[in-house]
Image: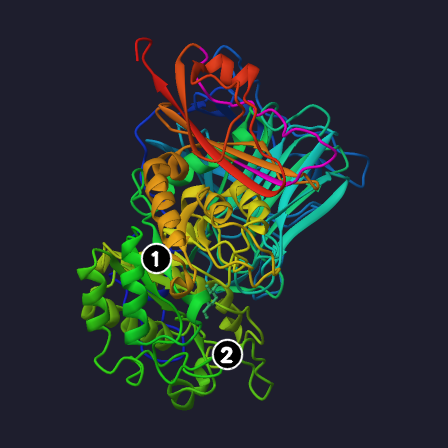
Amino acid sequence: MNTSTYRPHINGARPHFPCRVLLLLLVFVFAGGAQAQGPKATIRFNSTTRVFRIDTPRTSYIMGINEANEVQNLYWGGRLPDSDQFAAAKSMPGAASFDPPMTTTPVEYAGWGGMLYVEPSLKVSFPDGNRDLVLQYVSHKIDGDQLSIVMKDISREVYVTLYYRPDGETGILRRSAEVENRTDTAITIEQVSAATWNLPRGTDYRLRYLTGRWAGEWTVQEQPVHPGKTVLESRRGTTGAQNNPWFAIDYEGENDSERGGVWFGGLGWSGSWQISVEQDMLQQVRVNGGPNSFDFAYHLPKGGKFGTPAFCAGYSDQGIGGASRLLHRYEIDTLLPGAPKPKLRPVLYNSWEATGFDVNEVGQMALAEKAASIGIERFVMDDGWFGQRKDDRAGLGDWYVNSQKFPHGLKPLIEKVHSLGMDFGLWVEPEMVNPDSDLYHKHPDWVLNFTGRPRTEGRNQLVLNLARPDVRAYVYEFLDKLLTENDIAFLKWDYNRNWSEPGWPAAPLDEQKDVYVDFIHNLYGILAELKAKHPNVEIESCSGGGSRVDLGIMHLTDEVWPSDNTDAYDRLSIQNGFTYAYAPGVMMAWVTDSPSWANQRSLSLEYRFLSSMQGSLGIGSNLNKWSSEDFATAKKMIGQYKTVRETVQRGELYRLITPEHGSEQSVTESVARDGHEAVVFAFLHSSNELYPYPRVHLEGLDRNANYRIEVLDGRVSGETPSRASGAYWMDRGIDLDLQGDFRAMAFRVERVNANQ
Ligand code: DGJ
């Protein structure tokens, strides 16, 4: 993605077309990152039957152009042999006069028009009052690993290009669409999907999705797919923790966590979004996803193009476990900055839970010394270093160093951190402003607002309207200056409230709702420009925890903060839900103080470490209160983490026992990509009625290879052999010596040669 050619106009109104159109094209559709080396996908078109086949080693996706010139889905699932030929597509029969073929046929992308009653992929209105849009196939192009299909309305010059890019390694298909207005006037897009996914017709479907709230994010929900529509969404201007833009659908009766077919996907959009799952009158299931149509309108000028975000989806025949492993692999190999080899996450220290806003040069330096002594690699200063920031009531927007707290600027602290062998990171919240700030006093019109209406505050702050070119320029420039003048390796990019009063009074009336789109692609544009100019700077997407995690932001940030709740027991379920959709390697997990602020629960330091070691390890404790024993334990466990982090962060995750449905246990296993080791973390809430801990059966090992066991922390039962075959560890399993309340242990098995 390259946005560096774009220079916004410095005022509150919109830049004029064609500048804007260029911006849309450059920023809006994420480019999909690196193309991993690996098995190839093939895309073929049979001109006789007019059938498209997209095959990967794991999957087949088949579409045809039917007699109504609609692009119709014919199959999506496991790989079919080439010898299986598909006849020309034929529309579904209608169901009486009420549900004609137009509504029953599983098309790839439906305009709202005619007798379409299912969720449309695109709805537009024309200035003459027409709101009817019927899309038909025009042409297609196969260009390397990308298929594009052009469609057009039956009479108006509105074109839609559908893009399909399969990933050979995972079978995940990245889809997006581009709407082009070749009419003589502007049109308004009222609803637009990145893609419509059609599942095979069936009844016994189960939907999984993720819900949450602040400090209670990432709960896995399961429900049968019923006739009608279920809508997952955010109307908050941002991704939100209440729903996450991810879904998985399988057959309820047949599957377990490692077996059976699962269709799954994630939407790459960090603004208001929606994914609808709809079972129609013929028991066909469609999944539609894109920017939320609630309060939505996008003004597309004559000649303008609108690129949707990407919606990536795949199929696994290895249950929900296999589905999440495919997504993790896709994220690591193609999506994350630095893909296919994104950098491993360093072990970081952050004093937020220890000091709150009370940061200063002396205090941070003292903590940095202590952090360095236990093997920390990155020292991050959190909120409170800038403007007149003493608490959350003032200072946001004024990005100068607070001279009482840092009389010599940031440089002495940064140099000290470097001299201790760590790199330096800094907290920012660029899209926000406190009314009590110089910035707001100077530019009260820079926030989202409706003229003459209240400006609702959340955490005493307002949302800057990043859609405005002048706000975009301000945000980019202060961040660029900060990174240019200081040796900063990492930004923790926070975002601590959702939108209210999403008005943009400076824009022309018919363009004011474009804020839903322009805000987000300006955010993406800033991130992309910063990454291009400061390629070594890493960024964390932190939004109070879990509120801005999606495949769109993941393309531009190196890690995310899943929750402000750092209670190590609560984290087991939070992290469990997170990994259904996102790779453990991007999931920051801090060890913090006990009892935890969240539940006043006391947990041993070892338990807290083992919980956090399942993701990217950080320390957030008040090191000033640690005993020498705590330092020794932390140093040992950070050392252990470094030896297994590549496997944890980049490996294949198996949820051996999930902490769902009130389970007393939780066990995860990460298998190295090259299979040389597997790392297991096991947790017990409470022993009951003398029951032993369930026997743990490993997964993903080579049955015929030998593995040596090494206990990292805790105990296995006395009968455990020191080495055994993969078959033994998987089939016979291993007994763990875990009894009591809030106990944890970890071990790894390492492949050895027969004579080792
Ligand atoms: C919310 C974040 O999630 C916390 O980690 C911390 O950075 C605070 N904001 C700072 O205001």
Q: Nearer the viewer, residue 744 or 214?
A: 744
Residue at (50% x, 36% y) in the render:
745
Above or below for 337 versus 292: above
- The picture places residue 248, in percent across and down from the top left corner, at 60, 38
Q: Is residue 164 visible?
A: yes
Residue at (49% x, 49% y) in the render:
608
- The picture places residue 365, in percent across and down from the top left corner, at 27, 69
Q: CA distance from mark 1 to mark 2?
A: 22 Å
Q: Is residue 684 magenta?
A: yes
Residue at (29% x, 63% y) in the render:
368
Above or below for 681 versus 210: above
Q: Is residue 22 left or right of residue 599?
A: left
Quarter-wise, where is residue 55 in the image?
Answer: top left
Q: Is residue 326 magenta?
A: no
Quarter-wise, where is residue 283 in the image?
Answer: top right
Q: Nearer the viewer, residue 231 or 511?
A: 231
The region drawn magenta spans 682-703
Mark 1: secondary structure: strand
Q: Nearer the viewer, residue 556 or 137?
A: 556
The residue under label 2 is which amino acid type? Gln
Q: Say which residue label 2 marks.
A: 461
The circle on residue 176 is none
Q: Is residue 425 visible?
A: no
- Residue pushed farthest front? 628
Residue at (54% x, 65% y) in the render:
237
Q: Is residue 322 left or right of residue 525?
A: right
The circle on residue 539 is 1
The residue under label 1 is which amino acid type? Ile
